[in-house]
Image (tube, rainbow, N blue to C red):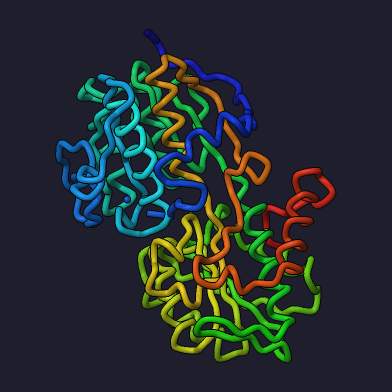
């Protein structure tokens, strides 16, 4: 047990691919999710802040398989703003803890803050109870609160996604979002220069224009934009990229308005990194007969109503980060003070083709994406992490 908080130097870990892949489990190789969260039971996705005992949502409980082991580990989940039901970032995190519940017999409670001011409240609430072996803090916006909370509860283990708190009771997980975004940008760049028609959409190669819709304008989301733009340039440096930020991860109306404006200006493919706002981009794509690219989860699965316009998704395996962190606690192998970084090489991010439209994308385009992925992994392509 720790008697005093101790600052440690950050340990950077590129998780071994075999270790990482075993965590995909229930989510599968393509089933992952999004960007916003506070405490509520299971996964009914409300934004209202409540605290309830839970071992999973009704849906996941009814589909649970027999656990391979039985553990008395108890986990607290503090989600990002936007909450469950975003079919992206938070839902991916929940899939990870549900997988751990099914495989290890752990129990968990959930918190869905309705504002950033509630992050420290829920972090402390879990820590003060003394009942939790691990508190999972989902999203970069929790970094500031956890910088204060973690040192005040040195005997409480935490994990943090998308940011780093350098104390020995926080295990940090980062992703190379720019690498996966490069891949979907490369796809968009190749298709916008071609006469492509499938599902409910089509491209206009005479325009050679694509778009990007972000949520909150912060450095993390700029990584998505930077990688996307670099991938587009890999295909053709003459392609115009339109960009907009909605200022929220839970405002589909704003995202739809931004996307409609881009489609009106000639864009035929738009990539969003805006959490639950992104459904607005999909709606606009259907209305305009154009295409969209999802984020965090395979959104052609999580948003099946829009399969006919979702070319691909940049999946970010937040579920595996949560699962692995819980597994480490179950096995007595928790690594506080470490930072695990997951990119293309570790299959922490990937371009996953849409369930309906993926088969319509040519083998030449797919081969080009395979080649650029290998070049990124080998270091022949250096993907930027910020926008110029």
**Vertical side of 198 occupied by 251: above or below:** above
| Residue 148 point in image, percent of width and height | 39, 31
Residue depicted at x 71% and y 80%: 240
Q: From where the camera sits, is residue 330 visible?
A: yes
**In which quadrant of the rendered view does residue 363 lie?**
bottom right
User: Whole-percent x and y of residue 11?
Assistant: 61, 24
- Residue at (51% x, 48% y) in the render: 29
Q: Tell me if 381 is positioned left or right of 114 in this view.
A: right
Q: Quadrant of residue 231?
A: bottom right
Residue 327 in picture, x, y percent from top left = 42, 25
**Residue 38 visible in the picture:** no
**Residue under the point 45% across and 51% down:** 32
Could you tell me residue 214's position as x and y percent? 52, 66
Direction from residue 39 to residue 347 in the image, left or right: right
The quarter of the picture where the N terminus appears is: top left
Compared with 156, 119 (above or below) is below
Quadrant occupied by the C terminus: bottom right
Residue at 37% over, 49% down: 80
């Amino acid at each position: 047990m720790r008697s005093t908080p101790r600052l440690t130097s950050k340990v950077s870990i590129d998780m071994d691919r075999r270790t990482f892949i075993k965590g995909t489990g229930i989510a599968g190789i393509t089933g992952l999710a999004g960007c916003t969260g506070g405490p509520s039971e299971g996964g009914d996705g409300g934004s209202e802040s409540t605290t309830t005992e839970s071992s999973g949502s009704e849906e996941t409980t009814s589909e649970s398989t027999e656990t391979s082991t039985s553990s008395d580990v108890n986990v607290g989940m503090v989600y990002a703003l936007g909450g469950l039901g975003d079919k992206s970032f938070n839902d991916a995190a929940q899939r990870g803890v549900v997988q751990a519940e099914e495989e290890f017999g752990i129990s968990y409670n959930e918190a869905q803050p309705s504002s950033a001011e509630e992050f420290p409240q829920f972090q402390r609430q879990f820590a003060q109870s003394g009942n939790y072996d691990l508190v999972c803090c989902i999203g970069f916006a929790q970094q500031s609160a956890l910088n204060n909370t973690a040192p005040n509860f040195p005997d409480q283990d935490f994990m943090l996604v998308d940011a780093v708190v350098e104390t020995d009771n926080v295990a940090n997980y980062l992703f190379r979002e720019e690498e996966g975004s490069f891949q979907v940008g490369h796809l968009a760049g190749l298709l916008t220069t071609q006469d492509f028609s499938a599902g409910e959409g089509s491209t206009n190669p005479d325009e050679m224009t694509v778009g990007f819709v972000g949520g909150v304008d912060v450095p993390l989301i700029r990584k998505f934009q930077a990688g996307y733009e670099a991938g587009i340039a890999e295909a053709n440096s003459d392609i115009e990229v339109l960009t907009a930020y909605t200022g929220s991860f839970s405002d589909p109306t704003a995202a739809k308005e931004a996307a409609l404006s881009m489609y009106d200006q000639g864009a035929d493919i738009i990539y969003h990194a805006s959490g639950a706002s992104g459904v607005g981009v999909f709606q606009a794509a259907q209305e305009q007969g154009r295409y969209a690219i999802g984020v965090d989860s395979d959104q052609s699965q999580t948003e099946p109503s829009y399969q006919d316009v979702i070319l691909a998704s940049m999946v970010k395996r937040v579920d595996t980060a949560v699962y692995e962190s819980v597994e480490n606690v179950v096995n007595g192998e928790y690594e506080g003070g470490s930072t695990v970084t997951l990119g293309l090489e570790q299959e922490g991010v990937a371009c996953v083709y849409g369930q309906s439209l993926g088969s319509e994308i040519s083998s030449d385009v797919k081969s080009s994406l395979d080649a650029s992925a290998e070049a990124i992994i080998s270091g022949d392509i250096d993907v930027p992490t910020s926008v110029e």
